[in-house]
Image (spheres, rainbow, N blue to C red):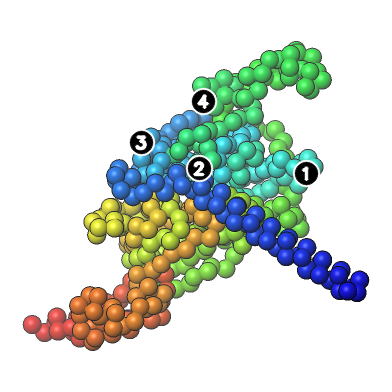
């Protein structure tokens, strides 16, 4: 056999071995991911997801700089069942959220105001100017577990940030454990450096113990402090578009095109392709704006639990169990938090003021099956099967199938003329 042929055969064998190895490695990663997901999918039977009533947060901390509110998994059992946690951070002008890292992956969304933000990765240089950014209303920030962040309100109005975390990899389902890198004494949120012997810190930093003491004792505040007026804070880079780090971890919804635009509103979906860091967090997000009385088509999530936060307006949410019972049927308003379990069909309907909400999913590529609209699951089932399944005649099946052929996902409110026309065709008027 010629030398060239032998070389070609060896290359084929080598490539085949590498492909198989990569395939096995990919399968192992998928299996590992599924194993990590198992605790959140222990089933919808028993006591799981029995109480889905929306909750409002409880204040955990307040100071001149702002406040921290949390939805507790202990009190809101549905959050613990979904292995999720949620919090609301309010920063007053000159309010500084001290540098902190957490034991869980999370997404933060700026719902009001603006702030300077820093996010420090475990690898790379420490060129500070590359890690200071201006985030504003509509920005979505992916924050991996163990990665420190800090936030500072440099504006004249308060800033509100919603944080939703996946606690699968944390210490306790439904609860996030923060580790603050600075701050005074506190039972839960004290500065972690206080736990070290000062002699050890002096040796680590190559300074004297008196210097360490001054460092640790000068700050009495915890969690959120207020920076004195006139104190300079880090400047923000203006060429973010040139920085791949920014593109990988922050997504600006208000500067992007909506994925769905209908007469009844619009939807922005943020997944691993738009925000690359989400593929490591296995989280996704959608932001929905519904016009008055419009609805997001009823449907269920194929692969994720969802945590919904009402940003603005009012409306109604219904969630249904697998036996046809209502799991939830309630009015919602600004500040409400609702858990929608995987597989549970749900619908969101805007009230007279419209409805804006964000929805964080436990998948970086969330998939949904819809019950109505152009993408209805029933449009994928043969008409004969649908008619026989509901025990209805073909004309009625056709009427249902031919409606909503234009709108998908977001369904606009019906006008008075449309309602009267439908009632007349059904023989309701004229009695």
Q: Residue at x 35, y 78 (%)?
A: 381
What secondary structure is marked by label 3?
loop
| Picture coordinates of residue 349, whole percent (x, y) | 33, 62
Q: In front: mark 1 or mark 4?
A: 1
Separation of marks 4 and 3 at Cα, in angstroms? 18 Å
Q: In front: mark 2 or mark 4?
A: 2
Which residue is under mark 1? 124
The answer to which quarter of the image holds residue 407 is bottom left
Alpha-carbon neighbours of circle 2 within 10 Å: few (<14), some, or many (≥20)? many
- Image side of residue 32 versus residue 406, left or right: right
Q: In front: mark 2 or mark 3?
A: 2
Against 405, residue 67 (above or below) is above
Q: Are marks 1 and 2 in contact (CB under 8 Å)?
A: no
Separation of marks 2 and 3 at Cα, in angstroms? 18 Å
- Image side of residue 356 versus residue 135, left or right: left
What secondary structure is marked by label 4?
loop
Separation of marks 2 and 4 at Cα, in angstroms? 20 Å
Which residue is under mark 3? 75
Of pointers 1 and 3, the one earlier in the residue sequence: 3
Q: Are marks 2 and 4 in contact (CB under 8 Å)?
A: no
Separation of marks 1 and 3 at Cα, in angstroms? 40 Å
Q: Are marks 1 and 3 in contact (CB under 8 Å)?
A: no
Alpha-carbon neighbours of circle 3 within 10 Å: few (<14), some, or many (≥20)? few
Which quadrant: the N terminus?
Answer: bottom right
| Picture coordinates of residue 323, whole percent (x, y) | 25, 58
| Picture coordinates of residue 161, whole percent (x, y) | 52, 45
Against 147, residue 356 (above or below) is below
Which residue is under mark 2? 168
Q: Are marks 1 and 4 in contact (CB under 8 Å)?
A: no
């Amino acid at each position: 056999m010629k030398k060239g042929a032998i070389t070609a055969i060896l290359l084929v064998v080598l490539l085949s071995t590498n492909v198989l190895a990569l395939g096995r490695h990919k399968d192992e990663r998928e299996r590992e991911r599924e194993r990590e997901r198992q605790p959140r999918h222990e089933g919808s039977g028993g006591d799981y997801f029995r109480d889905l009533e929306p909750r409002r947060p409880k204040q955990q901390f307040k100071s001149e700089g702002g406040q921290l509110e949390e939805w507790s998994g202990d009190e809101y059992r549905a959050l613990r069942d979904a292995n999720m946690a949620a919090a609301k951070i309010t920063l007053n002008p000159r309010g500084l959220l001290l540098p902190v890292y957490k034991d869980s992956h999370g997404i933060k969304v700026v719902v009001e105001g603006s702030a300077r933000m820093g996010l420090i990765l475990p690898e790379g240089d420490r060129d500070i100017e590359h890690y200071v950014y201006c985030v504003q209303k509509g920005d979505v920030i992916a924050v991996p577990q163990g990665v420190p962040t800090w936030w500072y309100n440099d504006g004249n109005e308060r800033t509100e940030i919603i944080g939703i975390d996946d606690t699968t990899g944390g210490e306790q389902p439904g609860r996030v454990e923060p580790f603050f890198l600075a701050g005074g004494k506190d039972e839960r949120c004290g500065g972690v450096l206080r736990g070290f012997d000062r002699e050890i810190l002096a040796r680590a930093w190559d300074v004297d113990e008196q210097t360490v003491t001054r460092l640790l004792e000068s700050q009495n505040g915890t969690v959120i402090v207020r920076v004195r007026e006139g104190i300079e804070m880090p400047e923000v880079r203006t060429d973010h578009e040139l920085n791949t780090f920014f593109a990988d971890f922050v997504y600006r919804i208000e500067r992007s095109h909506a994925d769905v635009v209908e007469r009844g509103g619009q939807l922005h979906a943020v997944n691993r392709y738009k925000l690359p860091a989400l593929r490591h967090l296995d989280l996704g997000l959608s932001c929905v704006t519904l016009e008055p009385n419009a609805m997001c088509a009823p449907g269920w999530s194929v692969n994720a639990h969802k945590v919904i936060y009402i940003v603005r307006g009012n409306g109604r949410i219904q969630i249904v169990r697998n036996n046809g019972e209502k799991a939830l049927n309630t009015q919602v308003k600004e500040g409400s938090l609702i858990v929608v379990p995987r597989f549970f069909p749900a619908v969101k309907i805007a009230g007279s003021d419209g409805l804006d909400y964000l929805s964080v999913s436990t998948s970086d590529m969330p998939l949904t099956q819809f019950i109505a609209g152009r993408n209805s699951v029933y449009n994928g089932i043969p008409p004969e099967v649908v008619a026989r399944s509901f025990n209805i005649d073909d004309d009625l099946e056709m009427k249902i199938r031919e409606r909503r052929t234009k709108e998908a996902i977001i369904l606009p409110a019906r006008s008075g003329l449309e309602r009267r026309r439908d009632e007349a065709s059904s023989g309701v008027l004229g009695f």
